[in-house]
Image: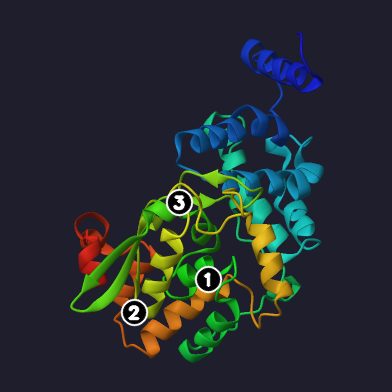
Amino acid sequence: IRGTRLDAERARSELMLAHSDDAPCPTVGEVWERWALPAYERRERDGDMSAYTLRQYRSGWNKHASPRWSDVPCDAVKPLAVQQWLDGLSYNGALQSMNVLRPTIDYAVRYGWAQTNPMRERYVMPGRSTVNQRDKGTWTLAELRGVWERLRGTWMEAAFLLSAFGSARVGESLGVLAGEVERHDLDGVPVALVPITRQVAHHGARIAERTKTAESARWLVLVGRAATRLCDIAESMPPDWPLTNDGMGGVVSQGRFTDCWRREGMEHPYRNLRNSWQTWVRWELGLETRYIEVLMGHRLKGTTGQHYDRPHAEQLAA
């Protein structure tokens, strides 16, 4: 075998499994490397899984699952040992690890090396008190107007408008191009229609040409003064520039933007603007939930919501 040590270990495992009736049950690590990880990578290439989700699975394996279970044969994993291991993890670490280990050992069961998957037992998970509690605060509509005044004329204004008055996620608010913003007038009310078809990736200043889910690809609708201002910003720059850019047409990363948001001394994290949008359109404008879900890019329940309800941008604006 010419290549890395990992290449040699993979080849060794494949030969053992393919050519010996008495071959031992593969270890959890061998199953991960041969079947589970390639399946995740294929889904990411095919567009069925985001690059961020793949990184989360890799992280869960490398940080928690691999050190404990990589060298253990799949048929030697015992529920008592799993529970003792879980007791030493945080809630998020345990959840992330089990999300990786359950489907991994499923391969061993599917191919006849193990009778059951012990990772699918009902375990006592670590308490949620082990999770660092995030700031869940939101802004009222009046408070958002105040934040807007602080940001008016700054390079952060366009992204803020898309999130605070349009429901954009963090990455979505940074991935819109100037030429994509459409100016409309509906019964005398200024309207800005913004297609969401991409997002800035979680890591690095790069565009991911996909949205979080299929339903996340949608039209954002901004109305009134927010719509007018967003259109003015878009028309002031080249159409192929991101609305929020580095001053030379380049992409701004999520990390840089949220760091700048914190340095501005904002009361809550930037991601909470989307929660704020949902709250004020529901409780201050009285918009019905069935409209809010579509505008936020959420999957609707039932056959009608999943297969038939396809409103046009103009209907959303109305």
Which class describes the residues within 10 Å of circle 3: few (<14), some (14-19), or many (20+)? Answer: many
Q: Residue at x 66, y 49 (%)?
A: 203
- What is the C-alpha distance between the residues marked 3 and 1? 19 Å
Q: Amino acid at mark 3?
A: Thr
* Vertical placement of residue 272 versus 40, above or below: below
Residue 249 in view (yes/no): yes
* Vertical placement of residue 154 versus 103, above or below: below
Q: Is 102 situated left or right of 163 in this image?
A: right
Q: Measured from the top left, where is residue 270 in percent x and y? A: 60, 72
Q: Amino acid at mark 1?
A: Phe
Camera-nearest label, 2 or 3: 2
Residue beneath label 1, please? 160
Q: Quadrant of residue 231?
A: bottom left
Q: Measured from the top left, where is residue 43 in percent x and y? A: 49, 37
Q: Residue at x 69, y 28 (%)?
A: 26
Q: Secondary structure at mark 1?
A: helix
- Residue 211: assigned label: 3
Q: Quadrant of the C terminus?
A: bottom left
Q: Residue at x 47, y 43 (%)?
A: 209
Q: Is 68 situated left or right of 205 in this image?
A: right
Q: Amino acid at mark 2?
A: Gly
- Residue 224: assigned label: 2
Camera-nearest label, 3 or 1: 1
Mark before the other along the chain sequence, 1 or 2: 1
